[in-house]
Image (cartoon, rainbow, N blue to C red):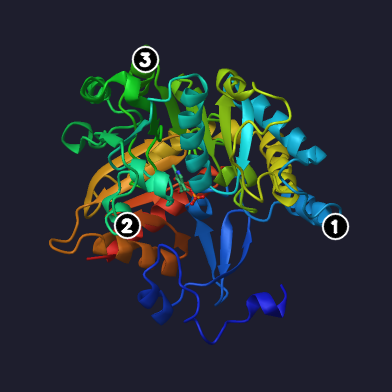
Amino acid sequence: MSNRLKAMPNDLSAFWMPFTANRQFKQAPRMLVASKDMHYTTSDGRKVMDGTAGLWCVNAGHCRPKITEAIREQAGELDYAPAFQMGHPIVFELANRLVDIAPAGMDHVFFTNSGSESVETALKIALAYHRARGEGSRTRLIGRERGYHGVNFGGISVGGIVSNRKMFGTLLGGVDHLPHTHLPAKNAFTKGEPEYGAELADELERIVTLHDASTIAAVIVEPVAGSTGVLIPPKGYLKKLRDICTKHGILLIFDEVITGFGRLGTPFAADYFGVVPDLITTAKGITNGVVPMGAVFAKKEIHDAFMNGPEHMIELFHGYTYSGNPIACAAALGTLDTYKEEGLLTRGAELAPHWEEALHSLKGEPHVIDIRNIGLVGAIELEPIAGQPTKRAFSAFIKAFERGALIRTTGDIIALSPPLIITKGQIDELIDHVREVLRMID
Ligand SMILES: Cc1ncc(COP(=O)(O)O)c(C=O)c1O
């Protein structure tokens, strides 16, 4: 490792860290200086098991040779090509490879640089699609309480996490929200999809009755809500949403930024639930988290609705300087090769029974009020300390890091989503870390 990478900076003040308790961090920094496969190395030389695939993105594990090599090679060959009115071969190759693994009918790919940009892109495509077909009155967007769709204005407007919304003004107009599907009184400690709550999808009928279908462009949901604490859809819920959207001519967008690329043991959550939306947003696992990239998948009908008018005219006035950046494309191709060679897009299904059993063995440990799991995702919900929400889980996060495991917490929920290369032995090790930590914290 180079000295530059190892050296600890002596002033941490300039960097305003995202979604971080900056003052707490800078008093006791948690620095990662290297990574390999399932582990990080900290600046004080400790190995830490990655229980969260970075931020739900390093699905193939860290510093995988195919990906590293592809980036290295591409950087010396074609570093950048203009994204507008110009092309380069591997962006087309990547789009084809992505369509090959996407749910049937998802025939086109629009590249972005993050999950947030994928969400903005999908919302804009939905609005423009209706307008292109002469249904310009369809301008409303429907999200869901406790939904997370990134941090840009469209995403926080359709999103349903109060802290992400309340400081930022009035947001987009014409947005409504479905209720969330978290019903702990009925579904606590469910393994896999909960029994109760499919009827919550009928709330969409109420919203349609209130606003009239002719004003609604799209519904956006995460098939499994990740960032808000792993909320798994009740059995039949997503199918109901699909049916109601189809009945009223409303587009259904699945935000698969977390669930895409194997997290549930299928390539996409759409495959897992057998429900095909009209648009899918992705990012994170598309490049194994290594180079920023996102992609929106669109059905043929949506894409084709734009392909009219004079041929020299731009069909969709949208895009980013780095859409389909060559180095990101190379990283994505190296990632897809790695997923394919190691069967990682379906490995979660093989590990899921062991994962489920290990996770639910934490039932009865101190503070645990719910455990939920699907594919290779799990959540352990803790009883909050009275009057001090989030503090208990944050202590668990700090203690786990000190003991050698990276976990993620949101509110008082511990969320786990390890790289898909994890072994059964490492699953047991990770869960044992959590068990010890639960016994240590107040
Ligand atoms: C479902 C979902 N959508 C969008 C995003 C935003 O992605 P990014 O942080 O890459 O902008 C995330 C990030 O966690 C996410 O989980």
**Which residue is denoted by mark 1 in the rendering?**
76
Q: Quadrant of residue 363?
A: top left
Where residue 246 appears, as percent x and y from the top left, is 40, 15
Crowding at dot 2, Cα within 10 Å, few <14 / some 14-19 / many 20+, comes out as few
Q: Are marks 3 and 2 in contact (CB under 8 Å)?
A: no
Where residue 198 appears, as percent x and y from the top left, is 27, 22
Crowding at dot 3, Cα within 10 Å, few <14 / some 14-19 / many 20+, comes out as some
Q: Nearer the viewer, residue 273 or 240?
A: 240
Q: Nearer the viewer, residue 281 or 167?
A: 167
Q: Which element carries disc 2, helix, strand or loop?
A: loop
User: Amino acid type of disc 2?
Assistant: Phe
Label 1 vs label 2, nearer the camera? 2
**Which residue is denoted by mark 3 in the rendering?**
243
Residue appearing at x 49%, y 81% in the figure: 12
**Which residue is denoted by mark 2 in the rendering?**
168
Mark pair 3, 1: CA separation? 49 Å
Classify 216 as above or below 164.
Answer: above
Q: Nearer the viewer, residue 162 or 303?
A: 303
